[in-house]
Amino acid sequence: MTLEEARAALHTARRVAVLTGAGVSAESGIPTFRDAQTGHWARFRPEDLASPGAYRRDPNMVWEWYAGRYRDVTRAQPNKAHHLLALLEREKGDGFFLATQNVDGLHARAGSERLVELHGNLSTARCEACGTVAPLPAPDTFTPPPTCPLCGSRMRPNIVWFGEFLPELALEAATRAFQEAEVALIVGTSGQVYPAAGLALETRRAGGVVIEVNPDETELTSSLTHSVRDVASKGLAALMGEA
Ligand code: OAD
Ligand code: ZN
């Protein structure tokens, strides 16, 4: 499929599902996970920070890392890619669905509403005892770990860690949207973390068109219909005719 055909398919589709990963926020200055030089996982092993075991061993260290990321994303701004996806949602209306693996909250800040955050959110915490989810105070006004507003117990980052299950309803809604989509866009993800990466294949299996936007080849590339080899902002602009 050529770029022109991909653009036409996106233009005429009534049902569009989008999966985003860390690459969509790279142009907002937020590091990805697996980029060899700058990614989080170039410096840390995921299991030392993003796992229940790591949190049991050293909750303060894990909290410090998440509090630092929370501070960084609060200072960052949504970029053109986030804004273009919010625009695409306004164009497609009810037929639009966005599933993100990102925990930075930038899609919501850009105005996306038909949105599920499959891996949680940096700006909230969850009570370890009663499960209450509450927003964190402003980054410079609190010292982690936060305590639950209802029961006073310690709260944990509201993030899905390695070895944990994704929120069931969010994953079900995303799976349905990707099965029904005529066109799926896979933007800025290495496609290595399941079940999120499997969403692309749901659309493909159901006979839909799947278009990737990524400067590099990914694990998913060979299974998809078309790849736009560019950064998220430019790739989406090219696909949406907004260049
Ligand atoms: P990765 O770091 O694995 O992949 C980022 C992807 O973005 C790579 O394929 C890059 O080529 C691409 N990329 C880099 N800059 C880009 C740009 N400007 N525009 C578009 N693409 C760009 O991040 P994810 O795929 O999101 O999970 O990782 C998936 C999950 O693994 C994350 O949600 C996180 C991580 O461990 C948890 O923390 C639970
Ligand atoms: Zn509680």
Image (tube, helix red, strand yellow):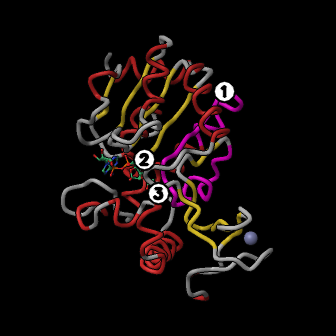
Could you tell me the amino acid type at mark 3?
Asn
In the rendered image, which residue does mark 2 sit on?
21
Question: Which numbered circle lies on residue 95?
Answer: 1
**Left or right: where does residue 11 sit relative to residue 136?**
left
Q: x, y (%) of residue 44?
A: 28, 66
Q: Earlier in the sequence, mark 1 or mark 2?
A: 2
Question: Which numbered circle lies on residue 79?
Answer: 3
Identity of the residue drawn at 54% across and 45% down = 165
Task: State whether residue 148 is above or below residue 40.
Answer: below
Identity of the residue drawn at 62% across and 20% down = 14
Question: Which numbered circle lies on residue 38?
Answer: none
**Left or right: where does residue 102 sit relative to residue 87?**
left
Secondary structure of the residue carrying numbered label 2: loop
Query: Between 48 and 102, which is closer to the camera in this rendering?
Result: 48
Residue numbers of the magenta segment = 87-113
Q: Residue furthest left?
A: 37
Measure how far apart labels 2 and 3 are at the Cα level. Answer: 14 Å
Measure how far apart labels 1 and 2 are at the Cα level. Answer: 21 Å
Could you tell me the amino acid type at mark 1?
Gly
Query: Between 5 and 100, which is closer to the camera in this rendering?
Result: 100
Q: Is residue 110 magenta?
A: yes
Q: Is residue 3 magenta?
A: no
Q: Mark 1 or mark 2, which is nearer to you?
A: 2
Secondary structure of the residue carrying numbered label 3: loop
Tell whether circle 3 marks a residue whose Cβ is less than 8 angstroms from ligand 1.
no
